[in-house]
Image (cartoon, rainbow, N blue to C red):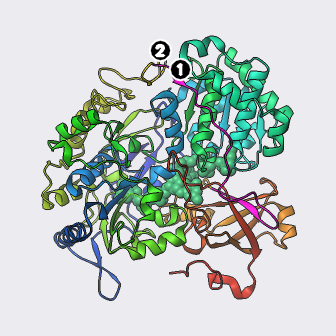
Amino acid sequence: MTLTRGSDDAVTVTGRDFPTNRGGLCRKGWTAAELIRHPDRLTRPMLRDRHGDLRPIGWDRAYDVIVEQIRRTQRDHGHDAVAVFGGGGLTNEKAYLLGKFARVALGTAMIDYNGRFCMSSAAAAANRAFGIDRGLPFPVADLDRANTIMLLGSNVADTMPPFVQHLAGAVAAGGLIVVDPRVSATARLTAGGSGLHLQPAPGTDLELLLGITQVLFAEKLIKNDYLARRAVGVGTIRRSVAALWPERVQSITGVPADTIREVARRLAWAADHGGCYLLTGRGVEQHVNGTDTATAAINLALLLGLPGSPDSGYGTLTGQGNGQGGREHGQKSDQLPGYRKITDPAARDHVARVWGVDVDQLPGPGLPAVQLLERLGRPDGVRMLMVHGSNLLVSAPDATRLQRRLADLDFLVVSDFVLSETALRADLVLPVLQWAEEDGTMTNLEGRVIRRRAVIEPPGQAKSELEILQELARRLGASSAFPASAREVFEELRLASAGGIADYSGIDYDLLDRDAAAHWPYRSESTPRLFTDSFGTADGKAVLVPVRPSRPVDAPPSGRQLTLITGRLLEHYQSGVQTRRIPELDHAVPRARLQIHPAAAARLGIDDGDEVLVRSDRGAAVCWAELTTLIRQDSVFLAFHFAEDASANRLTAAVADPISGMPEFKTSNVTVERVTSGQSGGAQFDGEEVA
Ligand SMILES: Nc1nc2c(c(=O)[nH]1)N[C@H]1C(S)=C(S)[C@@H](COP(=O)(O)OP(=O)(O)OC[C@H]3O[C@@H](n4cnc5c(=O)[nH]c(N)nc54)[C@H](O)[C@@H]3O)O[C@H]1N2
Ligand SMILES: Nc1nc2c(c(=O)[nH]1)N[C@H]1C(S)=C(S)[C@@H](COP(=O)(O)OP(=O)(O)OC[C@H]3O[C@@H](n4cnc5c(=O)[nH]c(N)nc54)[C@H](O)[C@@H]3O)O[C@H]1N2
Ligand SMILES: [Mo]
């Protein structure tokens, strides 16, 4: 987008003719500038006083309090008692410096971030199959020429509207295949033509993919030449899917056996006729078996010969503004800059040298987000938490329990530009800059590094996080210097990433200011397309990893139970902390609505617009029923954009995929009942009381 600053200090947003969005923005993009001068903006640090109120204080005092708390906590409980939680919305520079701050200034292993909730399963699957995790290993515009695109668990029409133009070719060719238990806005793009919408039972995509794979083998549709040249492990896949014939998969997923066969044949045809892509989104990834499901999708893509071919491919659609870059430079618990592994001695040596610290001083791997949050407030666990760029009380699973854990902390510091629900519970809040006020870079889903430029002065005493981290590191006596200008941080990031998987060493701000395309790895030139000759594994071949159906967290719903699906709406963003403050978006969807099928609603005596109470083993949420045939009769859908007693994450379980650490956000067993007058307002349910 292009930002223009008016004479009255107002910023206007216009779409920019850039290869990815070609001028398109979504409703949240058009209205984004409204938050820049919002009355809720934080302008001074705030400390909780004896009466429990947050009161403004000066920066010097804020730094003093934080440093004293860090020292005391680490003296009494050890280095790992102080933890850091980051976000995929942070610029590359902030994500990088936050990781360095944790390892060097705090000496803690305990750092992770909200990207663990986002793409970690797709990332883990790509790493083990290809040795590299870059959302799309090809430019988005390549999709324009595709005749067939299969979208699994992704609702781009609501979550990435400017991306939809890249589906136009496949839609016109009748080749859009959408897999979603709901008739989502994206699924509706398949209507009326020869596109296909598969509507499996939530959480059964792994079986569905194995079923399609079984047909490829049974009908001899796999690409043997490609596999012989480019992959290993085909034999194990053949054996692992042998028993999953379409009729059996139909009984698990509800997708007709004939449709399963048709999809297999269409994909194989498209692979031979130039232009076949498989893309995954959160709907298939945010499950306890998300890594295996993404792996099954990759196996399917490899059997069809798609990855690395000039006109076909496999990818995952990233999420937050810096969803890709945010996962490359060290805010992941197991990671150092450049997508290096913190357990790799050579990687540790390289980064320690760039930072000018003793390699033995660098902590080892910490814990992924769900496990990290599990340790909050425990006597021997995390006693102090610093949050940068996540409203985790609303967005992390099992919110009721997390709320208690946050209260058990000795000290919570939240950096934000408004009082998010998490910041509201902090002991100290630091006011930081918004996107239009700061320089930096972000890396999009194509691995393309993009410049963000400051156009407007920050309000009040709000400060850059880079400066905050620099000053805290200095006061803590860190053994490495912390630069505070975005350009200087990027120069250091270049060195730290050099030779790593996500190598940025050839990129600099001048190059980006010329709008040159810069896809990593970039040593001397950009790499828009990965895998054209070889994959990122030791021998250059992709690895087919056999996966098997696994058991869900909750047993299949029984009796009056329904399966709760959580996800997103067009009008709101994430925990809603920004979009609930923008009048146009708030008016469009002011409250949490539960999508429920009229047949299910009739059984439960629920009418359209009724206030309903949704319960799971974890807790309860209150919202309003929206009767719609766009959802299966056995499922309900609730967006996670709303807070307090309407929070969908009061219902989800903090149970994670064993490989990626991704929590099960997409399926939970719930019951739904109409709220009778006395219950209204959340007073009489067994969830947490409204603050
Ligand atoms: N408007 C808006 N846009 C956003 C965001 C936002 O909050 N609001 N967030 C951004 C971020 S961080 C992300 S990660 C992306 C996410 O973008 P998406 O992945 O598109 O978003 P979701 O709504 O979480 O899930 C997509 C679809 O998965 C379906 N689904 C649920 N369970 C299953 C299942 O078991 N199997 C299958 N096949 N499908 C299932 C849901 O019905 C839903 O339609 O969006 C980004 N864009
Ligand atoms: N039930 C359910 N839960 C989910 C999901 C789901 O589908 N279902 N999706 C998951 C996914 S994919 C994601 S990505 C997460 C996202 O969930 P969150 O991590 O909560 O994301 P946001 O709501 O964007 O919160 C970001 C916070 O940081 C602030 N912020 C923004 N930019 C900056 C910055 O530069 N610095 C600092 N310090 N603060 C900043 C914002 O004001 C906001 O308070 O939610 C996850 N939770
Ligand atoms: Mo995300």
Is 644 rendered above or below residue 78?
below
- Give the alpha-carbon distance from disc 2 to disc 1, as whole Å: 7 Å
Segment tinted magenta in the rendering:
540-566
Q: Is residue 366 above or below residue 476?
A: above
Residue 581 drawn at (x, y percent): 49, 66
Amino acid type of the residue that numbered disc 2 sits on in the rendered structure: Asp
Is residue 532 among the parts visible in the rendering? Answer: yes
Seen at 33% across and 26% down, the residue is 522
Residue 202 coordinates in the image, percent (x, y): 72, 50
Residue 411 vertical position relative to residue 220 in the rendered view, above or below: below
Please identify the quadrant where the N terminus is shown: top left
Q: Position of residue 114 (x, y in %)?
A: 45, 54
For the residues bearing labels 2 and 1, Cβ distance under 8 angstroms: yes
Foreground residue among 460 and 553: 553
Q: In this figure, which residue is indicated by the disc labeled 1?
A: 308
Residue type at mark 1: give it: Gly
Q: Nearer the viewer, residue 16 or 310?
A: 310
Location of mark 2 (residue) = 533
Residue 175, compared with residue 30, is above or below; it is above
Q: Is residue 186 visible?
A: no
Residue lying at 56% horizontally and 78% vertically, measured from the top left? 688
**Residue 485 numbered tag:** none
